[in-house]
Image (spheres, rainbow, N blue to C red):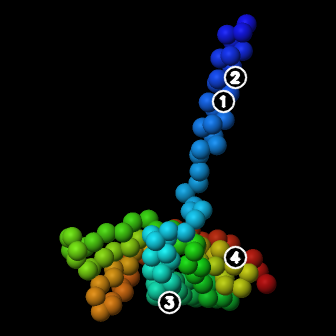
Amino acid sequence: MKKLFLVFILFLTLITSQSATVSSDDPTEDSNELQLQDMLMLMLTPYIEKDLTDYYYPKILTDVSPHVTPWKIEVVETKRVNDFRGFQLQITFEIEPTDGGQWIPVGKDRMTYEISSGPEVRLINHTHLKTYKYPPK
């Protein structure tokens, strides 16, 4: 009986310690990498909003223009196009543009931009993943 009770306590301790160490992917403190990613998103936001507006209006939205919140952009992939230390890069991310006023998501998109010296920012792929029903006024 004591052995069974001891095994139960050890098992319970193991389970609770493992669940306590599981964390989300969202950062909980600042880092150089996070600051650089945020700066990049701030710099890309005007390009993103223009391309989203061109796509959403008037086909999907007619009342509002889609807005971007830079802290809600999820970077999916980054890569160099022209090898090590080449300054032609691609960044792919997923974003949920909002209405800008109530911050209601209006859809979900995956976008790939090519960034090169100049600086030149060019949209090379836009995949509209989902349209959310926007509540009527």
* Disc nearer the start of the sequence (2/4): 2
Q: Which residue in the rendered view is the most extreme toward the left?
A: 83
Q: Which mark is residue 9?
A: 2
Give the amino acid type for the residue marked by disc 4 in the picture: Ile
**Measured Cα–Cα span from mark 3 to mark 1:** 51 Å
* Disc nearer the start of the sequence (3/4): 3
Circles 3, 4 touching at the beta carbon (< 8 Å):
no
Within 10 angstroms of label 1, few (less than 14), some, or many (20 or more) residues? few
Residue designated by label 3: 46
Within 10 angstroms of label 4, few (less than 14), some, or many (20 or more) residues? some
Front-most of residues 41 and 50:
41
Residue at 67 percent of width and 10 percent of height: 3
Q: In what quadrant of the picture does the N terminus appear? A: top right
Residue designated by label 1: 13
Of circles 3 and 4, the one toward us is: 3
**Measured Cα–Cα span from mark 2 to mark 4:** 47 Å
Q: From where the camera sits, is residue 128 visible? A: no
**Side of 69 where 79 appears, left or right:** left
Give the amino acid type for the residue marked by disc 1 in the picture: Thr
* Disc nearer the start of the sequence (4/1): 1
Of circles 4 and 1, the one toward us is: 1
Rendered location of residue 82, percent (x, y):
21, 74
**Measured Cα–Cα span from mark 3 to mark 4:** 19 Å
Q: Which mark is residue 122?
A: none
Helix, strand or loop at mark 2? helix
Rendered location of residue 102, percent (x, y):
74, 81
Figure check: 50 above or below 72: below
